[in-house]
Image (cartoon, coloured by chain):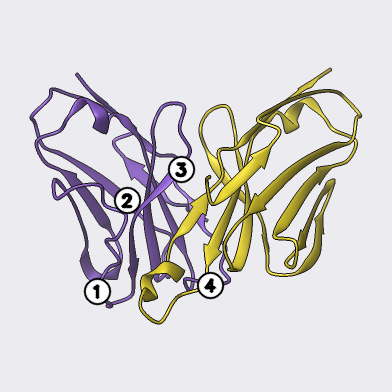
Amino acid sequence: KNEVEQSPQNLTAQEGEFITINCSYSVGISALHWLQQHPGGGIVSLFMLSSGKKKHGRLIATINIQEKHSSLHITASHPRDSAVYICAVRSFPHLSIKAAGNKLTFGGGTRVLVKP
Amino acid sequence: GAGVSQSPSNKVTEKGKDVELRCDPISGHTALYWYRQSLGQGLEFLIYFQGNSAPDKSGLPSDRFSAERTGGSVSTLTIQRTQQEDSAVYLCASSFRGPPRETQYFGPGTRLLVL
């Protein structure tokens, strides 16, 4: 079982629809990131969360630390939102594996297509 | 302002040759990361530099992979004796202060194809 699981793997929506992408993880984390990878390959950091909820424009990210789950919501979706959305977590550093806190572990991504 | 830049954008090489990939982070960013994204696979951490500290090399897949960061700025990822399974997009990212609560800024990547 991967440390970070995303669902769905693929999602097709009509313009204007509300979209939800889910991310579940199995380790204790210090932070969770949501990234957007455009069809051309460029990656943009959308959110960094350690608790609660963040909103930026039409994007909302939530995290439930107890349930080890995060969601990314896109309201009033638009074709330009078509991209791969990637969840990534940063583990807590351990006494014996200090470096564990340095790296991000990535989910497999959710490919979103918004049709006009 | 200038973002993270990487060069070359594309590299085609023959199996067994060495390649060097370059990353110019955002000026003033102390943390620098290298990642790899193989075709159809997720992103994979390779190496992390923070200031003058020893790098975290825990993600490097083999001893054919090495990286340097000179003067706390530009970084070079070197792959020796390339293999076909090294074909991937190699991404560099930088951040102002490093983990745990940081925003990473990604470069456009170098697409490597090993024939």
Letter of the chain that mark 4 sits on in the rendering: B
Q: Do labels 2 and 4 share a chain?
A: yes
Q: What residue type is labelled 2?
A: Cys
Answer with mark 4 or mark 1, whichever residue precedes in sequence. Answer: 1
- Residue B54, numbered circle: 1
Residue named by callout 3 = B43
Q: Where is residue A58 in the image (x, y as percent from the top left)?
A: 85, 46
Answer with mark 2 or mark 4, whichever residue precedes in sequence. Answer: 2
Q: How far apart are marks 4 and 1 (CA)?
A: 17 Å
Residue in front for this viewpoint, A32 or B109: A32
The C terminus of chain A is located in which quarter?
top right
**Residue B111 visible in the picture:** no
| Residue A85, picture quadrant | top right
Contact (Cβ within 8 Å) of mark 2 with mark 4: no
Q: How far apart are marks 3 and 4 (CA)?
A: 18 Å
Query: Is disc 3 placed on a helix, strand or loop?
Result: strand
Q: What residue type is labelled 3?
A: Leu
Left or right, B10 with respect to A52, comes to: left
Left or right, B112 with respect to B81, comes to: right
Q: How far apart are marks 1 and 2 (CA)?
A: 18 Å
